[in-house]
Amino acid sequence: VESMHATQKKGVYSCLSMYQSMKQYESFVDGLRQSGL
């Protein structure tokens, strides 16, 4: 049970970091658009 919980935690963590990098990418693209590229 413990190992399953750890795997679940890892999955949630990777989902969060993926979401964060997606948000960073979105704001990066928005910045490029605003600077006229």
Image (cartoon, rainbow, N blue to C red):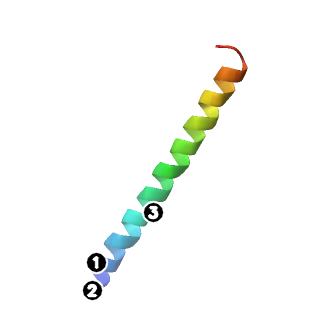
Number of residues whose C-alpha sits closer than 10 Å to that of mark 1, classed few (under 14), some (14–19) or many (20 or more): few
Quadrant housing the C terminus = top right
- Residue 22: image location, x then y, percent: 51, 43
Displayed quadrant of residue 25: top right
At a point 57% along the width and 44% down the height, the residue shown is 23
Instruction: Give me the C-alpha separation between circle 1 and circle 2.
Output: 5 Å
At a point 65% along the width and 22% down the height, the residue shown is 32
Pointer 3 residue:
13
Q: Secondary structure at mark 2?
A: loop
**Dot label at residue 1:** 2
Q: Is residue 19 left or right of residue 31?
A: left
Above or below 23: residue 5:
below
Above or below 16: residue 3:
below
Q: Decide: marks 1, 2 in contact (CB < 8 A)? A: yes
Q: Earlier in the sequence, mark 3 or mark 1?
A: 1
At a point 43% along the width and 57% down the height, the residue shown is 15
Q: Is residue 6 left or right of residue 29?
A: left
Pointer 1 residue:
4
Quadrant housing the N terminus = bottom left
Figure disc tally? 3
Displayed quadrant of residue 35: top right
